[in-house]
Image (cartoon, rainbow, N blue to C red):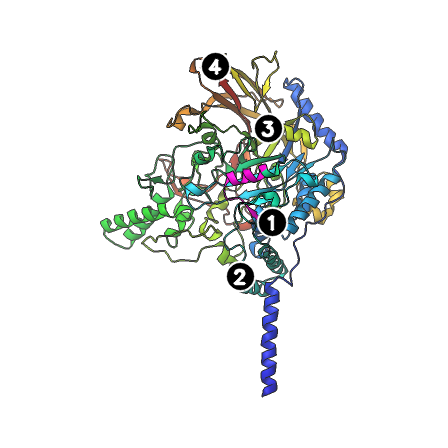
Amino acid sequence: MRTILTAVVLAFAGGVAFFVLAGRGVFGSHEGPGEVTPVARPAADVSASEAEVKEAASEIGVARPKQVLFGDLHVHTTFSFDAFLFSLPLMGGEGAHPPADACDFARYCSALDFWSINDHAFSITPEHWSETIDSIRQCNDVAGDPSNPDTVAYLGWEWTQVGLEPDDHYGHKNVVLRDLDDDKIPARPIGSQRLAGGVPPLWVRGLAALGGDDRMDDLVKYWTEWGDTPDCEIDVNTRDLPHDCVEAAETPAALFRKLDEWDLASIVIPHGTTWGFYSPPGSTWDKQLTAAQRGEGRQNLFEIYSGHGDSEVYRDFRAVEFDEEGNPTCPEPSEDYLPTCWRAGEIIETRCLEEGQPAADCADRARTARTNAAAAGVAVHRTVPGATIEDWLDAGQCTDCREPAFNYRPGGSAQYVLAIGNFDESEPAHFRMGFMSSSDNHYARPGTGYKEKFRRGMTESQGGNPEVGGLLGSFFLPPNEEPESESVPFKIEQPSFQVFEVERQASFLTTGGLIAAHSDGRDRNSIWDAMERREVYGTTGPRILLWFDLLNPPGSRGTPAPMGTEVAMSDSPIFQVRAVGSFEQKPGCPENVSAVLGAERLQHLCKGECYYPSDTRREIKRIEVVRIRPQVSPGEDVKQLIDDPWKVFSCDPDPAGCVVTFTDPDFADAGRDTLYYARAFEEPKSGINAGNLRCERDAEGNCVDVDPCPGPAGRNDDCLAPHQPRAWSSPIWVDAAGV
């Protein structure tokens, strides 16, 4: 008996030890950086691309053109926590996509001129930061002559902030660094906060390891390494902190202060500013316009478009309103906008009436539902038990926007941000940021917008996964609930995937955009200088060529002032826009890419499709100009300050492009600072998720049914719909001289 008891005790102790070891990630592998393929793009290809731009510029009449270089400054690898989760087999993932994959994709698949790595700082351990630096250096070492590289890789990270209420929400910003010398790189990236519940307790990790596959063991290893890294002390000069901690800055002011302490060349780029997936209803950018929060000198670019959709346009609807005590209330629907909180009331009222309850009681339940939903923030869907994607119709969406961000928050739109003013200081303050686009890809794939193929992997759309259950399912999805005819209150304690509308947003994720830089050269410093002077623009993915110039800047002796310029003048400004369409794409990949990568690597990395331009350019259909007159006094109605579109020019069908010239005859008499920017639209084509929820509308234009992505084809559905690829210039600011 004693022998049996001893054996049982030893077996139990061994089982516990095994469980603890599994929960500590002993059976998993460290997520390494991968190996950069040590072959540059052929110099002839790089030269040919430069020659094509020069030829197009010459044909459309651009004198002394700079190079136009295309890049992506928003790229995640599986060093990012969410990207790691997306890589799991249970999520239908592809496995590891480390920093080396991002380099190879930018070089071979998308043939980008420059890109940056931007993994979430809150989950980057000291080891991963060191490996990221080494990988970016390897990528640049392969690029050839530093004065004429095939691609330039910039180091960076994402500052990922999520507030529970509008007053404490600032959003996400990418930090991009110019240099790669040891003394010009921060000791650690600076995040905002750790993701609540990001590192599960030991017993959960043990269960995950024992119940999963090798990739799940790797996740447990990742969790353990992350959890073992302590938080840095708060309010200590960043240069005095140890290297082996995770640093946080809770507000933009704290982030900018820490960057100032490093005193290194960096650019901060806000993104996802209208993305209501995580931005609380009622959020606006007004609070970021204070001297401490606006990041003057660093925050000079704005991501107007990404794989999360368009963040350009302002609309005067709001998801919630606030009473005199600051409590959220539910606004009534308007012609183009159905608040999600209002739809919550409609769902509850319909269920109640279908049960045969008195109409008055059902109306009361609807009012309660609207109140609960308005108070729930981004978790509005959790207040209606058992509601499906189809039940919500198009509630919360900007229905007259082009590929808008999900649950659109217009108080973070580019137009709103540039229109508002702060009058608390001696001089009025306004944001002045150039426009750019990028991808926000989480599969180490910079610049995915060259072809509208492969929703799975070329976008962040996760719809069509196998059924995700167990521990992983509980992390991502709310519990299954039966439909009820009464609303339930829901209060968010901590931001997490469970409180976000993960499934419905899958219909709003696109292949993402590109930043284009008018640069004096291909080298790192020339590209950086173009970004600092805001001589950049954004596209929805295609390599549209765009020039926007002020033709009569004062004192220029006939030299135009390009996009991004600020001038003061009293005469009416005269502008010119020139646009040339992108190249039609050939199927597959160039032979040299296939030869370098090999068939297996080509398929894993590029999915067998690369940037592969033909000789045929797509037509530019029209050019639009937007005019914004920023606020000059508190309380001015922002809607009345934005003329969108101010001017519209149809273009002749000419593969050489389109040129328009115009003036603002009102400027001199108006006597107020004004900014202008241009949009160029290509001919229509199909785009992934361009139809969003694919509403069926009645005769009055109301959405009566939706066909969310993916449809019956599941994970193989690319959810294609017609759209017009486009490009946005950075603004030109024309101040009224003497005012």
What's drawn in magenta, residue-wise?
A: 246-260
Q: Main secondary structure of the magenta part?
A: helix
Q: Nearer the viewer, mark 1 or mark 3?
A: 1
Q: Earlier in the sequence, mark 4 or mark 2?
A: 2
Residue 454 visible in rendering = no
Q: Earlier in the sequence, mark 4 or mark 3?
A: 3
Q: What amino acid type should be assigned to the residue bearing mark 2?
A: Pro
Instruction: Report x, y in % for residue 633.
Output: 39, 24
Give the residue pinned by disc 2: 201
Circle 4 packing at 10 Å, graded few (<14), some (14-19), many (20+), is few
Instruction: Tell which of 710 and 185 is nearer to you.
Output: 185
Amino acid type indicated by mark 4: Gly
Residue 129 at x, y percent in the picture = 64, 47
Residue at 74% x, 29% y is 47
Answer above or below: position of 56 versus 452: above
x%, y% of residue 390?
A: 41, 48
Task: Check disc 4 and report the residue beneath it.
Answer: 738
Question: Is residue 255 highlighted in magenta?
Answer: yes
Q: CA distance from mark 1 to mark 3?
A: 30 Å
Relative vertical location of residue 593 with respect to residue 123 in this rendering, above or below? above
Please tell me which of labels 2 and 1 falls first in the chain.
1
Q: CA distance from mark 2 to mark 1?
A: 19 Å
Q: Residues within 10 Å of mark 2 (few under 14, many from 20)?
A: few
Q: What residue does disc 3 label? A: 536
Residue corresponding to mark 1: 124
Q: Is residue 250 above or below residue 200?
A: above
